[in-house]
Image (spheres, helix red, strand yellow):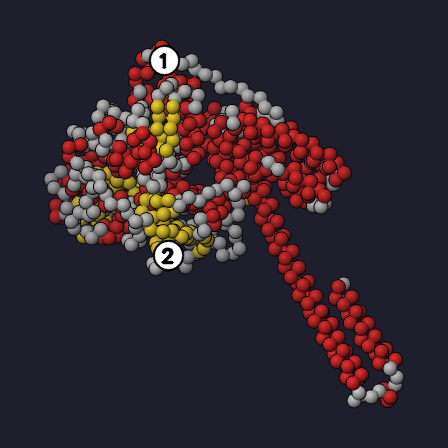
Amino acid sequence: MKKILLYVFIISQVNLFAESIISLGSLDTIDTDGEDFTLWMALFGLGIISLFALFLSSDKIEKFKKKQKEEEELTHKKNKKQDDIISKMGEDIYDITKENISTSNVAKSENQLLAITTNLIDFLRIKSNKVVIDHQKLKLSNLLNDVSGTLKANIRGKEFELIYDVQKSIVQEINSDTLNLSKVLVNILLYCVENSSTKLTLNIKQTSLFSKDDQLSFTISSDLKINVEDGLNIFQANYNDNTEEYDSLGLFIAKELSKLMKGDLIARNDTDQYLEFVFTIPYTIEKPEPIQNKYTVPKQIKQKNILLIDSSSTSAENIASILKDLNHNVKIINKREYTSYFKYFDIYDIIFLDEKLFTHKVVAELENINSKIIATSNLFEIEKEFPNTAIADIKISKPLTIWQTSDVLNQLFYNVHDTSKITSNGVINTGTALVHRNSFQNTRNISLGDFSKFQDKKILLVEDNIINQKVFVGILNKSHMNITVAKHGKEALKILLEDASFDMIFMDINMPVMDGYTASIKIREHKEYDGIPIIALSALTSSDEIAKMFASGMNGYMAKPLEKEKLYTVFSIFIQNTLHKETKKAPVQQTEIIELDGLNITLGISKSSSSEVFYKEILSEFRDAYGDTNKVFNKLLQDFRYEQLRILCIDIKGLTGSIGAEKLHLIVTDMLKKLSLKKYDYLSELVTQYTKELALINNSIDKYLNK
């Protein structure tokens, strides 16, 4: 239509020019050599050029507007999908807790609810721009151990093989964000395992050697044939109505975190059409501090002859590559042929042998040689007892890294600690503190109020993850214990220098600046701290890592995620005196029922994994992301943008249901009904009601969070 009008305009202008010529007189009387004629012809030519320029410009503007509209629609669809995910997660939390769950399904529902709750927190933080990237010194070995442990804790009944292939030139200590880096890698690996991958390789390499900010590249290769070249947006989170699960929610979070880390995450198909992910981030190398403590580990043992026998050929090749990078001679024997190789066993300094291959016949041969024996196992296989591996000098769990392997070899041939501090059990002297070498068992029928038996005790929590800090404090906040939190080992040492009267230290392993191993070693250098038990907190509790914990002077270990039943056992073992002093026993406190305008607190907590810590976190995120949505509602209503208003209502409907904002939930539900029936005249009054109720909710959230 616009083009037709433009054509009409051009023709009218040409006609106007012709009439002007005619008005000058007949063509015979026109002086073509005169200045007037030349001027008129120039003006006519300029006019024609201008009109055609206007035409072309109009065409380009129209194309530009069309492209801009398409981009806006694409962005709108993307945002709509994200909003639908938040809404659906909120509705799921509401529905799960509303159902009557049979006893046999309780555990399954709790796991599902916990996953939805934690995903909701991460998703909301990304939406409200609250994720902070903190670049600090970290150890890649600890990071990978944390990834392995977290992955194992999240996978039940699925066996797979994971290999860490780390470029030899990469240094162990770098500057990056350990929490978010770990979260990205775990989410990618979880996606692959949940889609039935059985073989995964995580390759880590440096992609630039000379730039100021080098690029660290993580390539995760899988055995999945998922075509991502066909336009499949694998990072777009969607709720699958058939499976009642979220497709790619973890990948969406990983993608957004990679952007915040100024990196990139892509999915692609390799030459054989297998799915792989490439995650790249900038990083800087951390200059290692000079080691001044007396527990210096030798950099590397002398060259050894090593025999390697593994059930997996891929795993064998990976371990052999690591050992060769450490300058050792390696011979690989196939598991089907190794029994015919017995007569050569004694020519090797070290034998790496898969735990499944320790037959009685093999053990009889190993008893007659002087070689060091290392039993290997797959961390992600269902745990079984292999009693014959008792003959091994050390047990290690795959996936291995070059740093972990180097530590294990050093343990075989060197005393890595000052012998004056070594006890008969082979651990650093802990003074009067007990050493509990086994895993802690659950104490049954424990409530949060039972922790008041340990009131007035001073606890130092060394943990960098804010959520983990809140969970720990949330369990103990009504027990009247004195809890001090340090974000890393260096900060913990500073706290201890000012106050050495702590009754117990809970020490995370994977932390920036100074990890748990280093912090524990430094604490044990001071005799005044010998009586303080140190309990390791780690996602990975494989046998070799547990041995390392005790070798660092720790007194026990707890696997993450934290369980109050095991935590109570720790207190009862290490703080015994309090249990026998009934005069100091505080009454068990009942959970306070709080009533606030607009919020059903009890309902909200029940929908947040029955955790007040998680509930408070969701409330905080809701307020920050949606606390002023009444203004948005009014603006959308004034501009007659009813579709955008509907999308926002869907979003908030699910969230209000999950936080126990029952009246606000009903108002938004009514708005959605009116929008679906196109009864727009009723919306203004509903938005007014929403504004009033939201103000009450915001005020109640502030009161509850600050109580």
Q: Would residue 58 be found to the left or right of residue 505 on screen?
A: right
Q: Position of residue 457 (x, y in %)?
A: 35, 21
Q: Position of residue 680 (x, y in %)?
A: 74, 40
Q: Position of residue 645 (x, y in %)?
A: 67, 42
Q: Name the residue rendered at 75%, 80% in the picture.
A: 42
Q: Would residue 331 be found to the left or right of residue 161 on screen?
A: left
**Vertical placement of 252 versus 104: above or below?**
below
Q: Name the residue rendered at 63%, 57% in the picture.
A: 68
- Residue 628 visible in image: yes
**Vertical placement of 74 versus 472: above or below?**
below
Q: Amino acid at mark 2?
A: Lys
Q: Name the residue rendered at 35%, 26% in the picture.
A: 459
Q: Quadrant of the N terminus?
A: bottom right
Mark linked to residue 584:
1
Q: Name the residue rendered at 49%, 27% in the picture.
A: 612
Q: Which residue is mark 2?
A: 212
Q: Nearer the viewer, residue 284 or 672?
A: 284
Q: How many marks?
A: 2
Mark linked to residue 279:
none
How far is the residue under mark 1 from the one under mark 2? 59 Å
Mark 1 or 2, nearer chain start: 2
Check disc 2: other Cα within 10 Å, few if <14, some if 14-19, many if 20+.
few
Q: Nearer the viewer, residue 680 or 581?
A: 581
Q: Secondary structure at mark 1?
A: helix
Check disc 1: other Cα within 10 Å, few if <14, some if 14-19, many if 20+.
some
Q: Secondary structure at mark 2?
A: loop
Q: Nearer the viewer, residue 140 or 647?
A: 140
**Vertical placement of 433 versus 207: above or below?**
above
